[in-house]
Image (spheres, grey):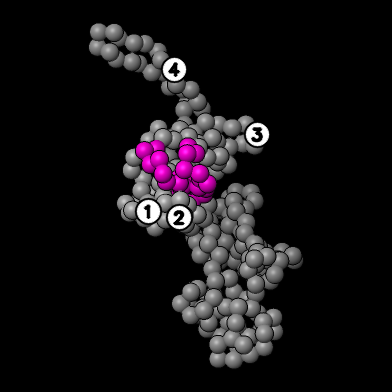
Amino acid sequence: MTGQFTTEGIDGLSALPRAVPPGWRVRFRSKHAGMAHQLYVNGRLADWTDTTDRRSFTLDDYGPCELTVAAVAPRERATDFSHLLPDEVRRPAWVFEAAIPRGTDLGRSDRIEATIVGEAGPIASFEAWPEHIRRWAWGEDRFGKGGFGYDGSLAPGAGLGAFGAGAFGMDADVIRLRMPIPATGEHEITIRSVSDKGPAAELPPIQFISAPPPAAPESIAVAAYDNQTQTVTLQIQRG
């Protein structure tokens, strides 16, 4: 695609199950001898090689996923080039996405949970304020050092977050929820913030139609072979 990023010349992609810890060993072949390689899972950068001769990745058990291997310049191996992938790869039909403003109304220990209506427990849970992200609530930042004299010097900056979603109309960072929904069909998903005292706020339900790829067969075996027509008949057993 570019001089630094390409998915061409890469084949032989395979995923072998790994027992402990549960996951997969992903192998591939590549014609790009002098380049590093990246692994994209459901359209997002998941891993990269630190050497140009490595031809495998270790993948945790993600559930339904689509894998893409790309070759990149070694100095760009940690750069996310997902924006160069085709749209259907970047936004799989079975991956739910939502962006929640990280407002200062969320407490330091609050979490954001996503739940499928009718199912027990959340399908995903995210920290509202991970340790590497500093809050800029009133009185928690340097007094008057932000824009227009507000205590907002730690805010993302104009045009760098969710526009006007922060205090006093300033921009706010966002919490990006992204999770595969393995069950085919229409789902109703609720997103809420949860504090130490229990649920704090909940958004209106979101309708999402999931269309995951078919499940992998449990086994594939050769049932018959016709030497004259050179035809192989396979027996496929589904789980």
Q: Is residue 221 above or below residue 173?
A: above
Q: Which residue is mark 2?
A: 76
Q: Is residue 188 left or right of residue 104?
A: left
Mark 1: amino acid? Gln
Is residue 36 covered in magenta? Answer: yes
The picture places residue 69, in percent across and down from the top left corner, at 42, 43
Residue depth check, mark 3 versus mark 4: number of the one nearer the observer: 3
Q: Which mark is residue 4?
A: 1
Question: Does the residue at mark 2 contact the one at mark 3 (Cβ under 8 Å)?
Answer: no
Q: Which residue is mark 4?
A: 221
Whole-number angstrom distance, CA of label 4 to CA of label 1:
41 Å
Question: Does the residue at mark 1 contact the one at mark 3 (Cβ under 8 Å)?
Answer: no
Residue depth check, mark 4 versus mark 2: number of the one nearer the observer: 2
Whole-number angstrom distance, CA of label 1 to CA of label 3:
35 Å
Mark 3: amino acid? Val
Q: Which residue is mark 3?
A: 20
Mark 4: amino acid? Ala
Mark 2: amino acid? Glu
Q: Residue at x 57, y 61 (%)?
A: 191
The picture places residue 45, in percent across and down from the top left corner, at 48, 51
Mark yes or no: residue 239 visible: yes
Q: Magenta residues?
A: 30-55
Q: Residue at x 37, y 53 (%)?
A: 4
